[in-house]
Amino acid sequence: MNKLISVIVPLYNEEEVLPESYRRLTNVLSGMEENYELIFVNDGSRDKTFAMASDIQKKDPHVVLVDFSRNFGQQMAVSAGLDQARGDAVVIIDADLQDPPELIPQMVEMWKGGVEVVYGKRKSRQGESVFKKFTSFAYYRVLDALSGWKIPKDTGDFRLMDKRVVDVMRSMPEHNRYLRGMVAWAGFRQEPLAFDREERFAGVTKYSLKKMLKLASDGIISFSGKPFGIMRWLGGLMLAAGLIDLIALLIAWGVTKVNTGWPFGIAAVLCVGGINLLALGVCGVYFERMYDELKGRPLYIVRQVLRTEQPKELDR
Ligand code: UDP
Ligand code: MG
């Protein structure tokens, strides 16, 4: 049986790129031996995106169109696509052709070779502002330092996932979704595929600064309890410094019989501040646990269970 590849494309006000995007995707996908379905998710566009996508859908049986009631954001659009996908492997790709569709066959080849997640890794980025390049460079390094999971640097959502990984994504009900982190968390055999990020084919970015910041903070908050750890360390250090200071002052007072006055004040501030911060950090441990429970992620992920059927005579 021929395998089925699902390709998910989130669309938000993409009337300028949709026809070209559809043309290039179809061109690539129809040339492969696998069957394919193309899942467009219209994320509450206010331009002609929906009309255009539904025209395409009427004419092309490969196309599935999911239409949102309003704009929910790219991560939700992709999640909806994952829920609809029936493929043995699923590819996520932006509509603006910054991620070249021509790489899909290579991803599929790697997948057939046993790789369960092939993530596009950006070697270079064309046509993006110095600000965007710098902030994203810095962000991935901070995320890497803070997060407990190795979330690959300089990767977006452009990737191929095996059906098993997609099933895991579906079983993670968290609301603030940072898919590339969730995929990293899931484990499985993951390998990068380096590529040069193209310029947007047409139109402007649909990621406002606000949306970008939300995504960035989701990445850190959902995958790291380290900010609390930093509080505990800092609080502990302050408290220790305050105590040492206090002891030194008390000894000096005993020796010289002169009460130095204000240095005691500083020691007290350090001690009280340190205790406060430490206590907050300790509360953080409980927060972290509650947050973990709330996320409701699966406890563990099984790739497969290997078992030999027991011969009858061993049955008791
Ligand atoms: N997108 C979306 N909903 C949004 C914002 C963006 O579905 O609220 C889609 C958009 O149509 C595109 C992809 O997400 O297919 C990436 O967006 P964009 O290219 O504007 O982001 P950038 O490449 O500038 O980070
Ligand atoms: Mg883009």
Image: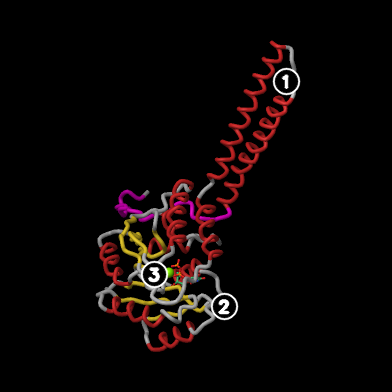
Judging by the rendered image, the residue that carries numbered circle 3 is 93
Q: Determine the secondary structure under disc 3.
A: loop
Amino acid type, label 2: Ser
Q: Assess whether residue 220 is covered by the magenta stretch.
A: no
Cβ at disc 1 under 8 Å from ligand 1: no
Amino acid type, label 1: Thr
Residue at 55% from the left image edge and 70% from the top image edge = 72
- Residue segment shown in magenta: 294-315
Q: Nearer the viewer, mark 1 or mark 3?
A: 1
Q: Determine the secondary structure under disc 2.
A: loop
Crowding near the residue tagged with mark 3, few <14, some 14–19, many ≥20 C-alpha atoms within 10 Å: many
Q: Quadrant of the N terminus?
A: bottom left
Q: Main secondary structure of the magenta part?
A: loop
Residue at 68% from the left image edge and 19% from the top image edge = 249
Q: Position of residue 25 (x, y in %)?
A: 33, 77
Judging by the rendered image, the residue that carries numbered circle 2 is 69
Quarter of the image holding residue 81?
bottom left
Q: Work out how far the residue at label 1 is from the one at label 3, CA to CA, in angstroms.
A: 68 Å
Q: Determine the secondary structure under disc 1.
A: loop
User: For residue 86, which numbered disc appears in the image?
Assistant: none
